Image: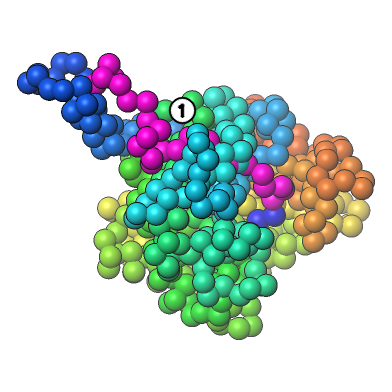
Amino acid sequence: MTINGEVNASVNRHPLSVNRHPFTIETCPSPICLPPMRPLLLACLCLSLTAFAAPDPTPYPFTPSPKGLQVQMVDDLLELGVHHAGINLTLNGLLSPAKEAKPGQPTAEADGFTFVINEAYAKSLDRQIKPLSDKGVVVTAILITYRSPNERIRTLTVHPQADATKGTTMAANTVTPEGRACYKALTDFIARRWCSSDTSHGRLWGWVISNEVNSHHEWHQMGPVTAEQVAAQYEEQVRLAWTSLRRHSAHARVYLSMEHHWNSPGHGDPLQACPGRTLLELFAKRAKERGDFDWHLAFHPYPSNLRDPRTWLDKVTFDDDSKKVTFKNLEVVVRKLASPEISFAGKPRRLSLTEQGFDVTKRPDALAEQAAAYAYAWEKISRLDGAVDAFLYHRQVDHAKEGGLRFGLWSNKPGSIAEPDQKRPIWHLLKAVDTPEWKALAENHLKTCGLKSWDELNPK
């Protein structure tokens, strides 16, 4: 369930079109011994060397912990001392409806097609990403597609079998030649701008591809389809994105996206949703058949009931047959990612928790229960042997259009959509993570969770 604010960003530097690269003879490597040649030929050689440059070898950053947040307010996020941040990156927002670029307007190319880039959106993303990555925060982007009101953009970016009215986020158009080329061009643009050795626009280290795909009726809309059909389409979409990313970064990470239904579909119609475990297994099988690659998993272990933050009361089991996976039994997913059928090159797939929050209910102890749920979740992932890349708490501020759910570290001002009002106890608890104050503050919540010690959370 991803609910984000306004989308009005665009990209400004075209990574694919050769006529926008500032190639000069002076940029060519001088130590190479070359026979005399005309300046134009030498410039062409420089262009070739640049076009086929090796991907940036910088390793995925090490951070002291997975402490993170889906960002709305950068200054507040930095005050909290997080190491990871999540942003939404709207693919259709990158695309201009124009068929031809005006002079100086950026374009992107793939498979013989040219696409005009919405420069304003790219610069808007710069303003989100760069202040974070410049401070050493590891930024992960959720690459999602909405149903654009513009017919051309909608045709290029949305899966052609998607319902015309249903769903919030869409499966990408990887089907038609132009739609597939558009997806390739846009992901290459993102990789070149924010994932290469050039960090002048900021740096992304994680790509979450689409959103909660096992609930595809709402969050990866591609019409009524079987689990096998979802897996086939999604594997193609993820592989295309990964290919773009690997041209520019050797170690940035690509993640699948799934919500907490593990062995239950989350919908009465099997053509509208499928169990997460089923989709994961089908995806892994197809990827291996086509040539395996280093994908990972972004998982959303919300409490079993999103309107009850007391995840310690979730009725789940601790084996692979559990109907849901929440923070209470998160080790189920960790074990699965280390299993022979899922692991890659003898190592477990990485796990990132990219969207989950705890609701403030109407109960008298609601604020204490929200904070206790965070303490419980943090202590749980701290006992999973470093398997988790990031724990991106959702949300920073309550959002008035989130179905009445109040996940925020801050309340929102009455009458506003997401204007911050007051900090909640969970804000102070999150800030204490990685500090000497954490232990005492967290232990204050043991009784609420029905525990005597956090060691009772150790995986069995």
In front: 115, or 1? 115
Q: Is residue 11 magenta?
A: yes
In front: 458, or 197? 197
Indicate whether 233 appears above or below 149: below
Badge 1 element: loop
Side of 258 relative to 36 (left or right) = right
Q: Is residue 398 magenta?
A: no
Occupied quadrant, residue 80: top right
Q: Main secondary structure of the magenta part?
A: loop
Side of 430 relative to 208 (left or right) = right
| Residue 24 pos. (x, y %) | 30, 21
In front: 318, or 296? 296
In front: 160, or 247? 160
| Residue 175 pos. (x, y %) | 42, 68
| Residue 304 pos. (x, y %) | 68, 65
| Residue 460 visible, this angle | no
Side of 185 relative to 99 (left or right) = left
Residue placed at 74% from the left, 58% from the top?
310
Residue placed at 52% from the left, 30% from the top?
202
Side of 163 relative to 37 (left or right) = right
| Residue 144 visible, this angle | yes
Q: The magenta stretch spans which residues? A: 4-28
In the rendered view, how is the structure colored?
rainbow
Q: Which residue is mark 1?
A: 199
Indicate whether 274 appears above or below 425: below
Q: Residues within 10 Å of mark 1 (few under 14, many from 20)?
A: some
| Residue 42 pos. (x, y %) | 19, 25
